[in-house]
Image (tube, helix red, strand yellow):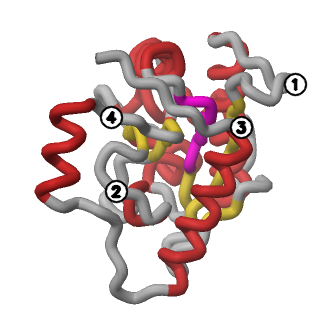
Amino acid sequence: MHQVNNLSAAQALEKLKEGNRMYVENEKSYPDVSLSKRRETALHGQQPYAVIISCSDSRVIPESIFHAGIGELFDIRVAGNVMDDHQLGSVEYAATHLGVKLIVVLGHDHCGAVDAAINHDPEGYIKFITDEIRLAIGEEKDPYRACCLNVRRSMEIIESSLEIHKEEENGLRVAGAVYHLADGSVSFDI
């Protein structure tokens, strides 16, 4: 069944901001992960209102960060929130088949992948990730600024690879954000 989300990018961004506010302010509040919600989404499909491309770091949990339940976010997780054809294919699927209008690249402070790109020369498959991050950060040595540069590069890859209509109210929108591990807040204007 082909499901289409009817939220605009602006509405989805406000929903994420409100969800993050609730996450930061509440110690014990959870979104709907009930048996009935699982059954509903199994029968009627998912209707995510945003794509979140985030780091695989176990401390970065988009559903918790944005106070979202089952079927609300289309998560793409990869170390360093870097983009390649696999991630782009997932974004394209969410936009074209599920009607998602908002794509968020969510970096985070204290990122091990960014640290590895700045301070180490890893080998093996990790090198694919750190090489991509190095393309984003150049000679930047400040970890937070490097994180922001890395988020911006992933945004640029998405925008140049997919048909993004920023000027249209109902077109796709790509937003960048940084999650702060210590307090749980998200900065959207990086």
Q: Magenta includes 172?
A: no
Residue bearing the label numbered 4? 46
Q: Is there a contact, CB below 8 Å, between mark 1 and mark 3?
A: no
Question: In terms of sequence position, does the residue under pointer 1 or pointer 3 come before the other?
Answer: 3
Residue drawn at point x = 68 percent, y = 45 percent: 176
For marks 3 and 2, give the CA distance: 27 Å
Residue bearing the label numbered 1? 167
For marks 4 and 1, give the CA distance: 27 Å
Mark nearer the viewer, 3 or 2? 2
Q: Position of residue 155 (x, y in %)?
A: 67, 31
Estimate how packed mark 2 is, as few (under 14), some (14 to 19) or many (20 or more) residues with alpha carbons within 10 Å.
some
Q: Position of residue 175 (x, y in %)?
A: 70, 41
Estimate how packed mark 1 is, as few (under 14), some (14 to 19) or many (20 or more) residues with alpha carbons within 10 Å.
few
For marks 4 and 2, give the CA distance: 11 Å
* Residue 145 visible in this rendered orientation of the protein: yes
Q: Amino acid at mark 3?
A: Arg
131 or 92, which lies in front? 92
Q: Magenta includes 105?
A: yes
Which element is circle 1 on?
loop
Position above or below: 177 against 87: below
Residue drawn at point x = 54 percent, y = 29 percent: 100
Label for residue 152?
A: 3
The answer to which quarter of the image holds residue 32 is bottom left
Main SS category, magenta section: strand
For marks 3 and 4, give the CA distance: 28 Å
Residue bearing the label numbered 2? 69
